[in-house]
Image (cartoon, helix red, strand yellow):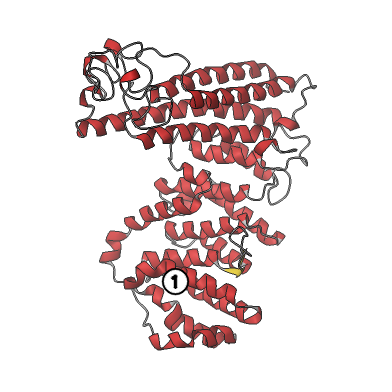
Amino acid sequence: MKTFPMFELARGSSRRVASAVVAVCLLAFAGAAFAQEYKEANVDESLAAQKDSVIGGGDSAQIKNFLSKYYLARWTVRANGRDLVKYRQELVQDGVSLGGAAQTTFLKEATSVLKSYAGSSACYPACRYNAVLAIGELNVAAGEDRNSPATPYSDAIPDLANIVASSKDVPDYVRYGALIGLVRHAQLDIKDEKLRNGVKTTFAKVLDEKYAEDHKIRDEIYECFAENAVTGLASFKSPEGTKGGSGTLDLFRKIIEDNDSSFELRCIAAKAVGDMKLDSLKGYDYPGLAKSLVSLARDFCVEESQYIDSELIRDSVKNAANGMGGAGGMSGGMGGMSGGMGGGMMGGGLDMTGGMGMTGGGVSGGMGGGMSGSIQNQKSMEAIVARVQYGFQCIKTAIEGENKKEGLGILPKLDEKDEKQKAFVQALKEAIEEFKKTDEFIETGPKTGGMGMGMSGGMGGDMYGAAAGSNIKVGANDMKDHLLERKLAFNELLEKLKFNDNP
């Protein structure tokens, strides 16, 4: 199973993640950017003073001239690269300041010029990316206040969809910028049914297994494409596909069951199921979906255990390089990673408080401690805890809906009085209890301990073996042990469901 560590996107911080992904995308083109000679427009600064009269006048020819020779022409000048975000904000503000025919003309002409920049290999990459982002950010009305959403420019939707699905040689970062725009429109509600179905179709194309290959999307960023497409589809809160029925729900279920998909993507799909209005699907295979969610919970435990191992190794190497935990690293001292007489500054042995094993050996350290390690970085441990809580919360949402809202989640769709569905109802309820155990474990810490508790070895460091200076009461190995227990519990549930595979 692939791991793609971008949980922020799944939590709704798509802007931050988008910036990070695009930074990676554009860096890949940096060498070529310096080698290639890009074209820059001749910017006529004298037109700046005409801004208000031109864009407010509504004359198409004058607006096009103003945009292509000054207003948007500035975007093509590489020396202005640092100002592109400011230019985008200015464009959006000027668009919503207009009304009627003047606004219609301004937005139409601006989209036309921006589309030409996004599609032109003569423009430098940052210009192309910001151009396509701007198309998706255009509005016809601003929100009434900070908490009110704007009304997006819906005429931009076909252009964005065409860029995402274009058969032409379009850079993946340009396609990605267009996809971000489509997600924004979906999240702010697309009222026109034809446009809405078109966007659904585009999201489904992105999720097709051939999309990345056909459009030369690099593996390291395709997961972000897929996550955005699922997020976009989830915005409609409907199980229906473009032809009605259960098309979107079927697609999400396929993702949930796909062991080759990243866990993050499977989580987003699960959470989306919990937000769907499922009342129209009376005869759907909810028992099968229930089993898939329990399997996802089991897979999650395995995935996160592997992630913790990778973090332990990374932190051990980092500490060794800094001279902090060399002997307490992967093969340190007589007690392996977590204990023994060479346990490092926080990981046992002769630690800061002195003693030879009293603070770091004990039950889980000792002479043959295996891969226990010591995560000194507070943020790393916080990330581990956040991943665990987030993953289980997504599955819990799929089961009983967000905050147990009436009619949401698949649990209310199963009939406990039906003998064939009873086992699936019970399995989901028991899964929720397992999630609660995890919340309690994270809040209170391990119930049992002794001298060698957690990832950094008992009382010599943090009492619960967590990162130095952290309020987290569980350590990396505590969490691994806990996840192993949950994995076994979910396996038991799946064994029980084997006798009910054909409800």
State whether residue 284 is above or below residue 338. Answer: below
Towards the viewer: 426 or 324 = 324
Locate residue 58 relative to residue 5 in the image: left or right.
right
How many numbered circles does the render carry? 1
Instruction: List the single residue furthest toward the front.
Output: 353
Is any atom of residue 210 visible in this view? no
Is any atom of residue 216 visible in this view? yes
State the SS at label 1. helix
User: Residue 294: x and y, percent?
Assistant: 60, 26
In the image, what residue type sits under mark 1? Tyr
Quadrant of the rendered image containing residue 434: top right
State whether residue 105 is above or below residue 270. Answer: below
Locate residue 35 relative to residue 473 in the image: left or right.
left
- Say which residue appears at 75% left-offset and 38% top-offset: 406
Label 1 belongs to which residue?
87
User: Residue 385: x and y, percent?
Assistant: 46, 32
User: Residue 106: x and y, percent?
Assistant: 57, 78
Within-10-Å neighbours for mark 1: few <14, some 14–19, many 20+: many
